Amino acid sequence: MRGIRPFVSGLAGACGLEVAHRVMRRLTDDAPRVDALGKHTVKEVFDRLGIDAPQGNTLYSTALAGEIITNSLYFSQIGGRRGMPTLLKGLNLGVMAGVGAIFVPQKVGLGKEPLAKSAKTALLTVGLYAFGGLCAGLMAQLLPGKSS
């Protein structure tokens, strides 16, 4: 999994997830609030460190940067290989991330409201992350050069 291919694939997955999230928020009130969870998480981390958390746009930008970085790293596990197994691996990783996004925040004290306030919101959360995984897998298919 060396080289830039896995990183670029992971970044495509993270960006695909973010774009789909923004579109979904405009289309339905039941959309998961990945952004709200990210801001809450940033505030919680700063509080635990005893540091004043950023406010306003800086808080949003910090949360967004954290989401893009962590999701890029997660989706980079897909690697840079071509073929149907890569797409299936992307879908699998996306579904697992979506399920984790529903249950993990509750377990660590961040609540369930942003991503699982209803069954529809929970299903949309899994769909968002699955879409991100497919974007990462598709990018691995499209990148030129040798597959790793």
Image (spheres, helix red, strand yellow):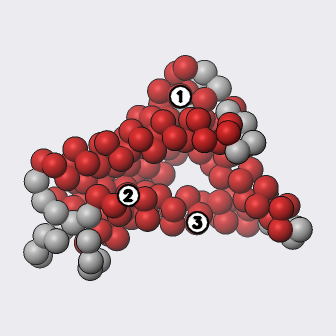
Residue at 72 percent across and 36 percent down: it is: 111
Type of residue at label 3? Answer: Ala
The residue lying toward the viewer, choosing from 104 and 130, is 104
* Residue that label 2 marks: 75
Q: CA distance from mark 3 to mark 1?
A: 23 Å
The residue lying toward the viewer, choosing from 95 and 134, is 95
* Residue that label 3 marks: 65
Residue 98's spot in the image, x, y percent?
47, 39
Residue 64's spot in the image, x, y percent?
60, 60
Q: CA distance from mark 2 to mark 1?
A: 20 Å
Foreground tag (3 vs 1): 1
Say which element carries label 2: helix
Q: Quadrant of residue 97?
A: top left
Return the disc, 3 or 1, that comes first in the chain's sequence.
3
Residue at 67 percent across and 39 percent down: it is: 107
Say above or below: 71 vs 121: below
Return the disc, 3 or 2, that comes first in the chain's sequence.
3
Residue at 58 percent across and 66 percent down: it is: 65
